Image (cartoon, helix red, strand yellow):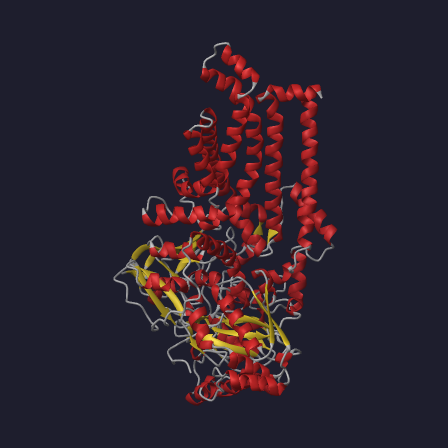
Amino acid sequence: MTAARRVAGKLGGLLLTLFLASLLVFFSRFLVPGDPVSFLLRGRKPSPEAVAQVSAQYGLDLPPWQQYLQWLGGVLQGDFGRSLQYRQDVTAVIGERLPVTLGLVVMAGLMIAVVGLVGGIVAALNRGRILDRTVLIGLTMLGAIPSFVGSIVLIAVFAVQLGWFPSFGSGDGGFLDTVYHLVLPSIALAVVFVVLVGKVTRSSMVDQLGREHVEVATSRGLGRATVVRRHVFRNAIGPILTVSGVLVAGLIVASSIVEAAFGLAGIGSLLVQSVDRLDFPVVQAIVLLVVFAFVVVNAIIDILEPWVDPRSAAGAGAR
Amino acid sequence: MSDPQHRTSTHRGVRRVSRRGTAVVAGILGAALALTGCTPPATEAPADPEYELTAQTDAPSGDIDSFSWVSYAEPYSLDYAYAFDYSDNQVLSNVCESLLRLNPDYTLTPALAESFAHPTPTTWVYTIRDGVTFHDGTPLTAADVVASMSRHLDPAVGSSWYSVYQNVTSIEQTGDREVTVTEASADSQFNLAMGGSAGVIESAATLAEAGADYGNSTGGVNCTGPFSLTEWKSGERITLTRYDDYWDESLRAKSGEVDFIFMNDANARVNALASGEVDGGWMVPLEAAPQLENSSVGDLRFGMSTAVSSLIVSNLDGPLGDVNVRRALLMALDREGIVSAAAKGYGEVTDALTTESVWVGASEAGLASAFDDLSEYPYDLDAAKQLVEEAGAVGEEITLVTAPISSDFTVIAQATAAAAESIGLKATIQTVTPNAYTALFSDPSAREGVDLFYTSWYLSSPDPLEMYSVLRTGEFSNYGEWSDPEFDQVVNEAIAIDDPAARSEKTAEAQRIANEELPWLPLYTGPMSLFLGERITGVAPSIAFLYYPWAATIGAR
């Protein structure tokens, strides 16, 4: 019952967040200087009838609130309107690019998880020793490399100099070829976030290692591996999950830089281009998509947490 | 004046638009380079490079399976009605054909129209070529021509080429293979534009079938060119395939396929070319010219262009309303220095708003009076200061707008502000986003309070009147609302003259007025650049690549 209520509450909050986001996303475009129609006509000499007709085609002749209702009605049916720059349905434009960004985010996420978790755990278990400091310094150095610098260095070394990896594009569409093309971009995207996961993992683990129940478990003669697995890591995972939720949205947004540098047609580079070209329908769709991904991932984490970490459920019940 | 071989082309508001994406990313990468310490100091002015114009690269040794080509941007659309920019037209020119063909030397020859006639001053009659098929195998008919051309008149389409058609009153099939265009007044320019996108012919059935998706990455196109569009992987690449039933044997494609790869980032383009990952590209970033010129993976070539880089005077109510202040500002600009810094030396100072390359069919007298009789504005600070003093403009303020689009924008903005200050004006540089910069070209409210902005303006037809007709009173792109009744009359008279030689003499008058009055301040012209990798050869480096099926001539080295 409590669990069901929690889930229902989460869903309600999720829908409210999305609704508010849709308002913000839609109306913010009226604050941006620039006229979508003059973009559509791209500075050429239009006939007055053309201006009127083109405005009508894109619904730009309606008052803003009507435009919003029309847009929201479309969005609820999966229709995000038509892209001004590509003269194509927004769903088609984004649909073609989404797989690239998802692939990039998944690969980078895996790298972050593996390097960050392993680094954080190794550091925590060797707290204060040379290995701890080496890992911390290593992670901090990686985290200090902005994606665009990482991209340039990776391309210069592994694509241009050594020729091991391609420097642009997402390949011919085959799974292995796509993975091969996404290796360097994923690394460039992952480096910034590795330090975050690593440090949270380490401090969360260190925190747990000092807890009484761990000492109790150890004094009962349980093996170190078992203690770490069952008592330390399981309890430490909450904060790590929370941080990972934030990461997902961050990765999608940060992918724009990496995608641009590696000539990948993902939604990150599309977002930058679309902002630049006043392509409001596309910008609105992508921003809404990112908000959606962020909210959903965090809701899932919230809902999952009690199962992963029984204490938070107990705590919630006691409240 | 410029070397007669030296052709220049103009880029219009439009190119700025599509380069916006490029600019943002370039900015980011510029910052990255600065952080990693590999930026060459921008202030160093190296000796100007030696370069010569190439008319045609070596002939290919034979066919090639495929080659790849890099583009700084993805086409917005392959719909010829919207193809108004480098990125669209460099692809489209190989796939779709026009009634006439604009050749690399900017001459016009028959293409889908095997001939044309001009029986009355206001009618153009096109005889449609027999034996031509669209890529889906259906034959070209007069009805296709009528349908294709009529789209420019349809306000729902919002054609980019509307201005070409603005005098057109009817487009009709007047015979089995004959189409007649009637205009409200005599207009020599209409036929000249039929070599460009305004004259492209598409299958009427395809237009009806694809509807609103025509020309986008899902709708595609079905034309008559030497290549057909086989795949458009949105955001990444376009693949063209040789069309085996192409009608013109002399332009049969030598390559089985061509891959256009979109790379917004200038460094990425240079890397791809230098590492041989991509076989070639137009408009190479000039910063990388030394690197590419000395590379062993291909050749950097320069060819004719029609662009002129200039400063648009967009406010004649301010101090620049006085022609002497405009002249003074031009004389205070060290234009040789600007060529070195902004164009890395690949260019020449000019006092005209057109290049000689667009004066096709001009008489010798016309060409001479157009270029030799121009007032020159040599760098002369003392004379410039005196002009400003005489005009009583000392201490007055001007605002110039720039945007982080490419390095030439920054160089020119700073040089112009410094020049204005040096002659007693107060200058403010306003830096706006590339997008806001583009709005200057389309939105009068964006130009409020703006005195000057930079452009590089190219011409799409082999006639300088394309430039000067823009500067007539009330024209959309006459951004400063400059008005000179004598100039208007000269241009209008010239437009009505059919004979290119006679017309050129009239147009020369317009060029001389613009040179005296300086509604825009001409700065310099530069060549079109081309990089060819070591696998391929056989192309004419010319800005005609926007309308001529250049990729068809490229084969194996």
Residue A135 drawn at (x, y percent):
43, 33
Camera-side residue: B412 or B532? B412
Could you tell me which quadrant the N terminus of chain A lies in? top right
Q: Is residue B453 left or right of residue A49?
A: left
Identify the residue at image location x=51%, y=29%: A201
Residue B326 drawn above or below residue A305: below
Q: How many marks?
A: 0
**Of all residues shown, which one is farthest toward the top?**
A220
Camera-side residue: A53 or A43? A43
Could you tell me which quadrant the C terminus of chain A lies in? top right
Residue B157 is at least partly visible in this image: no
Identify the residue at image location x=62%, y=76%: B480
Residue B65 is at least partly visible in this image: yes
Identify the residue at image location x=40%, y=63%: B287
* Residue B288 picture quarter: bottom left
**Of all residues shown, which one is farthest toward the left?**
B61
Residue B146 drawn at (x, y percent):
54, 67
Q: Is residue B242 left or right of residue A77?
A: left
Residue B462 drawn above or below residue B44: below
* Residue B401 picture quarter: bottom right
Residue A169 drawn above or below residue B440: above
Q: Is residue B180 left or right of residue A161?
A: right
Camera-side residue: A173 or B150? A173
Identify the residue at image location x=41%, y=67%: B44
Residue A134 drawn at (x, y percent):
42, 33
Camera-side residue: A129 or B235? A129
Residue A168 drawn at (x, y percent):
41, 49
